[in-house]
Amino acid sequence: MNQKDKNTEELILDAANKVFIEKGLDGTRMQEIADEAKINKSLLHYYYRSKDKLFCEVFNKAIQKFLPNTVKIFDSQKTLFEIIEIFIEEYIGLLQRNPFIPMFVLHELGKRPKKLSETFSHLFGEIKNNQLVFFRNMVRQEIAKGEIIEIDPNQLIVNIMSLCIFPFVAKPILQTIFFDESSKEFKKFIQDRKKEVSDFVINSIKVKK
Amino acid sequence: MNQKDKNTEELILDAANKVFIEKGLDGTRMQEIADEAKINKSLLHYYYRSKDKLFCEVFNKAIQKFLPNTVKIFDSQKTLFEIIEIFIEEYIGLLQRNPFIPMFVLHELGKRPKKLSETFSHLFGEIKNNQLVFFRNMVRQEIAKGEIIEIDPNQLIVNIMSLCIFPFVAKPILQTIFFDESSKEFKKFIQDRKKEVSDFVINSIKVKK
DNA sequence: GTCTATAATGTGATAGAC
DNA sequence: GTCTATCACATTATAGAC
C-alpha cells in the first residue's frame, strides 16, 4: 500500500512516527506533523484528540519494535552459540531498518522512569519470565558443561545489547570521529558489525580446548 | 566551596547543569532553572542573555567530560591490556559520577548532526589525530606480535565504548527488566562491570598460547 | 544586582462554517 | 471529514523601579 492509498488517519500516524522519533516528544510541534502529513493541523486533534494521545500511539509501537523478540530463535533446537549469532544478526538488521528507534525509546524512558513498569508491565513480564529465564538457564548449562567460561548471565546479556544498540545511539559522534562524516563508511561499519560482534562475544566466552 | 559561598552566576550554572542534563534542551523551562537555583527568573537573562547561550555553556562542559581523556594513560609505558583495563575502570568511574551525561550529550548531538564537526572540531581533532592514532598503532603492533587476534581497531574501540556507556543510557529499562526497579542492585551491577567488561574484552582479543 | 510587571511570541486545542 | 479563525495558556525575553 503506497502513501496515496492511505486514509488520513494512517497518513497522520506515519507522519507522527517520523517526527516524534526524530525530535522526541518535547521537540515535536503539532504543526510539523501536519506539514509532514500534508494535512490541516486541526485534523490531528480530530483523529487523535491530543498530542499526548498521538505520542502514546507512536511510542507503544516503537517500544514493541525495540524490545527483541527472541521467541522464534528460542523455540527451535539450537546451541547457545547459534542463538547468539542469529540474535545479533537479526537484531542489528532490525536496527539498520529503524536506526532512530533506540535513541527515541531510551530518551523518552529516561524522562519517565517511574511510570515504566506499570505502563509496560505486560511487555516486560513476557521478557522477564520467559525469554530471560530461558537464556539464563541455557548459559548456566553451558557453564556447567564447560563449554563457556563462568560469567553472570545478566552481564552477558547487557554486553550483547550494548554492542548491538550503542552504535545507533552514538551515530553522529562515531560518524564524525571515525569516518569524517561519511555516511557510506558508517553503513559499512554497521554491516560489518553483524559478524564482528558475534565473533567478539563468542570468542570471549568460549572455552578453548 | 559549598553552595552558600557561590555567587549568583555559579548558582545559575549549577542549576542549569542539573536541569538541562536531566530534561534536555527542549524539555527544560527557564523557570525550573530559576527555582533550582532559588533566584529570580530575570537573573538568568541578566547573566546569560538567552536560553540558548546558557545551554551552550552547559553542553560544552558536558561534552568535554564525556569525551574520554586518555592522554595520561597513553603517556606512560603500559601494555595494551593494562591500558584497556585502566581505561575501562576510570571511564566507568567517571560515568558513575555523571550518570546522565551520556544520554544528554548523545541525544542533543542526535538533533544537530550537521553542526557537530564545525563546533567541536578542536575537541575531535585532538582525539582523531592523537589518541586514536596511538591506540590503533598499538593494536596493530600487538596483532603483528601475535599477542591479540586480528581485529579492526575501530571495531574494538567502539566495542569498548559500547560496553562502558550503554548501561547508563539504558538505565531505566535495565533497572526495570533485570532488577525490579532496585536501584541498589543496579549500582552493584555497574560496579561489577568495571571488572566484567575488562575481562570480557581482554578475553575476547587475547591469543591463548 | 535583583525584583515586579509585562511584552511578544509560540503552541496545543476548540468552535463553527462548509 | 476538512477547513478557517481563534482561544487560552505557557514561555522566552525585556523594561523599568528599587
Image (tube, coloured by chain):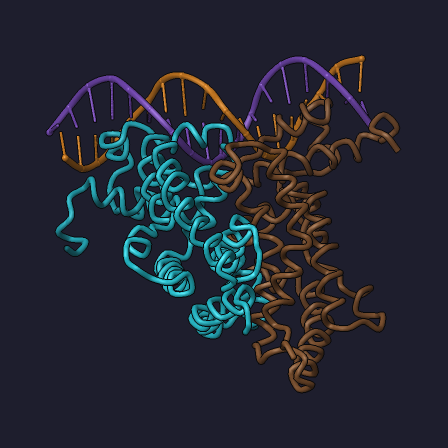
Chain colours: A cyan, B brown, C purple, D orange
Q: Position of residue C6 (x, y in %)?
A: 58, 19
Residue at 59% across, 60% down: B116
In the rendered view, would you say B38 is above or below A26?
Answer: above
**Residue B113 visible to the viewer:** no
Residue at 68% across, 72% down: B132
**View extreme (front): residue:** A145
The foreground one among A8 and A131 is: A131
The foreground one among B147 and D18 is: B147
Asked whether, in this view, residue C13 is left or right of residue B154, the answer is: left
Q: How many marks?
A: 0
In the rendered view, would you say B142 is above or below A10?
Answer: below
The foreground one among B49 and A150 is: A150
In the rendered view, would you say A119 is above or below A14?
Answer: above
Tell me which corner region of the image, top left, top right, bottom left or bottom right, holds residue B209: bottom right
Residue at 72% across, 69% down: B81
The C terminus of chain A sits in image quarter: bottom right
Asked whether, in this view, residue C17 is left or right of residue A66, the answer is: left
Asked whether, in this view, residue B44 is left or right of residue B113, the answer is: right
The N terminus of chain A sits in image quarter: bottom left
Q: Position of residue B80 (x, y in %)?
A: 73, 72
Q: Position of residue A55 (x, y in %)?
A: 36, 36
Q: Position of residue B3 (x, y in %)?
A: 82, 28
